[in-house]
Image (cartoon, rainbow, N blue to C red):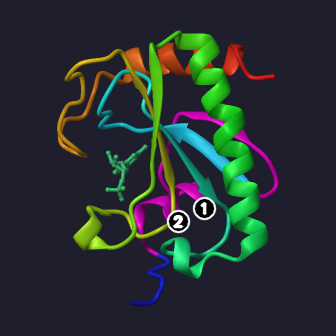
Amino acid sequence: MTYDPDNIFAKILRDEIPCIKVYEDDLTLAFMDIMPQAEGHTLVIPKTEAQDLFNLEPDMASALIRTTQKVAKAVKKGLKPKGVMLAQLNGAAAGQSVFHIHFHIIPRQGGIDLTLHARDQADMSKIQEIAEKIKAALE
Ligand code: 5GP
């Protein structure tokens, strides 16, 4: 499978569709998932064309995990969940639905608190409110 430049995250990177951004640098972008599996569900993507882990340059993999760690720390500090889960899916068989590599950062409160994957769009004003808390906690 080759990289599709019209996938949704490529469109976000080109500012063709909006996102609620929490962090950006030269190599990566972090923004809120609009169909969160838990409150505060955040996505981190590289600014290069790579559909999955197997097509990502090692230097970009390094940049991606650095930003993921930075944003996960802000999620932990800003939202104070009991735990923070990271997920990264490769291939449709693994559940991947957007074919531009990304890490999910999912705050967990313990127990069964996850909603279904990429199913229900949350209230955007609520997501914006949560994003502000994460941004305020970024170091
Ligand atoms: P995957 O299934 O590929 O691991 O995850 C894709 C994620 O992208 C899902 O959690 C889904 O909710 C999220 N998503 C899908 N479309 C959009 C969109 O247009 N904007 C944002 N912010 N997230 C999206």
Residue at x 81% of width, y 22% of height: 139
Residue at x 65% of width, y 60% of height: 46
Q: Which quadrant of the structure image shows residue 45?
A: bottom right
Residue 15 x %, y %: 58, 54
Q: Nearer the viewer, mark 2 or mark 1?
A: 2
Residue 13 x %, y %: 60, 58
Q: How many marks?
A: 2
From what the image shows, is residue 52 above or below residue 2?
A: above
Question: Between 16 and 44, which is closer to the camera in this rendering?
Answer: 44
Residue ranking furthest to the bottom = 1
Separation (CA) of disc 2 from disc 1: 6 Å
Q: Amino acid at mark 1?
A: Arg
Residue 124 x %, y %: 37, 24
For the N terminus, which image quadrant?
bottom left
Q: Is residue 24 magenta?
A: yes
Residue at x 23% of width, y 44% of height: 117
From the viewer's perspective, is 83 left or right of 73? Answer: left
Q: Is residue 17 magenta?
A: yes
Q: Are marks 2 and 1 in contact (CB under 8 Å)?
A: yes
Q: Report the span colored magenta.
A: 6-27
Badge 1: how crowded within 10 Å, few (<14), some, or many (20+)? few
Residue 23 x %, y %: 69, 36
Q: Amino acid at mark 2?
A: Ala
From what the image shows, is residue 74 above or below residue 26?
A: above
Task: Indicate if the residue with disc 1 has its beta carbon within 8 Å of ligand 1.
Answer: no
Tell me the element at label 1. Answer: loop
Tell me the element at label 2. Answer: helix
The residue beneath circle 2 is 10
From what the image shows, is residue 61 above or below residue 136?
A: below
Question: Between 91 and 13, which is closer to the camera in this rendering?
Answer: 91
From what the image shows, is residue 131 above or below residue 57?
A: above
The residue beneath circle 1 is 14
